[in-house]
Image (cartoon, helix red, strand yellow):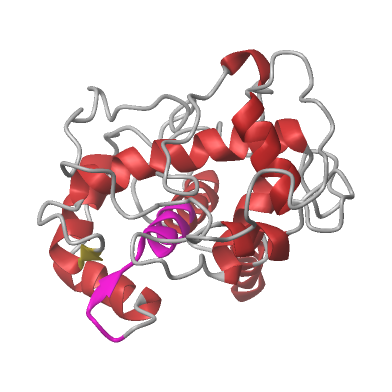
Amino acid sequence: MAWNGQQPPPFNPSYNPNFTQQGGNPSAPPPPQSHPYNAYQPGGYGTPGYGSQPPQTQYGAPPRGYGAPPAGGYGAPGYGTASPAPPPGADPTLWYWFQAVDANHSNSITATELRQALVNGNWSPFNEETCRLMIGMFDTDRDGTINFQEFAALWKYIQDWKQCFERFDTDRSGNIDANELANAFRTFGYNLSPQFSHMIVRKFDRASRNTINFDDFIQCCVMLKSLTDAFRRKDTSMRGTIQIHYEEFLEMVLENAMH
């Protein structure tokens, strides 16, 4: 990732709250699992690495700004005004970026402000749904915004997903096609058909290129995990099949869609 053309600061775990959500810790992409329908096991999804560290090699140069603000966006840190000093233990660059993104100086960031600050590798902005999803995951006081510490944890989350995305973007195109997505799902432990991966790409392909961007990759993987968790809670026999009423099905889908 880059911030105004520079590498982002390393994440400082000293100010990383232990944010959790139902089903696990959102701070990292999921490791591989084994199960009759390859759902996630209790305690999964909380450790990065898929059982091993992802490759350390990059694309030669960092991809064009995954998760960073658009080139020229927000100007210099501080957004034209003097910013307060960073809190103790905070990385100054990350703090000043937070101040720049906080356009109304409320000391918190909305999904709209976050969307204006994040871009994909092709400089397209993150989609609204992904930004709302991530705000919801890290908004511990449920006020619809994130403060600096929540923002710092979210930034670490994006960095973790960036490493994951790069691992499966095998042709170094800056996006993920259906075959690469199927490989990612297999690595996560899902036993899903190639047709399902193609359907997911069609659903999330916003540019009619038969690929998905970084933000959509995050969204579809989180959606799949959330639905799998909901299914698994009903699958008490762990056989990969459930019998539910129509309204229960609607609740499962709507809870995921409105997360």
In the displayed structure, 33 sits above or below 103; it is: above
Q: Residue furthest left?
A: 171
Residue at 25% x, 51% y: name it.
Answer: 185
Q: Residue at x 36, y 44 (%)?
A: 162
Residue 216 painted magenta: yes
Which image quarter holds the N terminus?
Answer: top left
- Locate residue 254 relative to residue 186 in the image: left or right: right
Is 74 within the magenta? no
Residue 99 position by quadrant: top right
Image quadrant where one finds the C terminus: bottom right
- Residue at 39% across, 74% down: 204
Number of marks drawn? 0
Tell me: 218 left or right of 14. Answer: left
Nearer to the camera, 166 or 35? 166
The main secondary structure of the magenta stretch is helix
- Front position in the image: 166 or 195: 166
Looking at the rendering, the stretch of residues picked out in magenta corresponds to: 208-222
Outermost bottom residue: 208
Report whether residue 138 is seen. Answer: no
Q: Position of residue 118 (x, y in %)?
A: 54, 57
Residue 113 horizontal side relative to residue 177, left or right: right
Q: Position of residue 86 (x, y in %)?
A: 76, 25
- Compared with residue 251, is residue 150 higher up or lower down, i.e. above or below? above
Q: Can you say whether 174 is above or below 48 in the image?
A: below
How far from the left and from the top, in percent, is residue 187?
A: 21, 41
Residue 140 sits above or below residue 212 on the image: above
